[in-house]
Amino acid sequence: MTTFQGAPCAVSYGPNRIDVFARGLDDTTVQVYFDGSRFHWGNIGGNIAAAPAVSSWGHRRLDVFARSHNGTLLYKSFDNGWSEWKDLGGSIRSAPCAVSYGPNRIDVFARGDDDTTVQVYFDGSRFHWGNIGGNIASAPAVSSWGHRRLDVFARSHNGTLLYKSFDNGWSEWKDLGGSIASAPCAVSYGPNRIDVFARGSDSTTVQMYFDGKQYHWGNIGGNIASAPAVSSWGHRRLDVFARNDQGQLVRRAFDNGWSEWEII
């Protein structure tokens, strides 16, 4: 067990495997992974200035992103071994988020200097920079439930949840309402299903999910001190992580019902 600063991020590349990353107290990148029986702690180095982001497009493949102290986008990947950290340039003012909808494809989003939403995507050969607009007040979150499908969420300046999707073209930004006090996180465990979590104003964990027809709001409790993170390694499986007020990693899992919160 160790402590960290900021929010964690999480991803799963297969059943019973979860990888969690966070910014350490010394600005290196803490890694925690679950191998099906227990959690293991490690560190993949770097000098990061915000919570990292992680995505996976294949078994034992990890792509980690973070903001540098100069506001550029940093990148490190695992494919039978960790690469060196690489500076991809650009200019972002928040932690990034990342997702993959298929092999050799990664989409990364972050809050830009002008509160619009920066997009960086990897097409298998190189990274491309763009912008999908908006007026966001937090780091964004992204999930994907199908090929070339993206769902982006962020906190508005009024504390509501904003939403924009890509399906053969970008939709307009939509305000879904609610009240959140942190950046959101998002994941999909199947077509037309999205689960979004954020820290509420009372430090509990707000949940919003889309069931293919409508959005539902709820709360899974807890007493968290950061934006949460979420991953899924199977249908109707969710693992939610956050930092508590003592800087420790806490988790709550859903598998036919919610577990109790636990310290990892």
Image (spheres, rainbow, N blue to C red):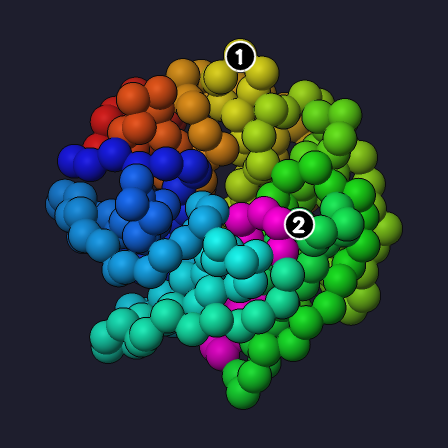
Crowding near pointer 1: few (<14 within 10 Å), some, many (20+)?
A: few
Residue at screen point 41% across, 54% down: 48
Crowding near pointer 2: few (<14 within 10 Å), some, many (20+)?
A: many
| Residue 210 drawn at (x, y percent) | 64, 38
Taking 214 as reference, is 13 above or below it? below
Taking 236 as reference, is 18 above or below it? below
Q: Is residue 253 left or right of residue 139?
A: left
Q: Residue furthest right?
A: 172
Residue at screen point 39% across, 42% down: 8
Is 66 colored magenta in this rendering?
Answer: no
Residue at screen point 53% across, 48% down: 95
What is the magenta range? 92-107
| Residue 202, numbered label | 1
Taking 17 as reference, is 203 above or below it? above
Q: Is residue 248 left or right of residue 135?
A: left
Is 105 colored magenta in this rendering?
Answer: yes
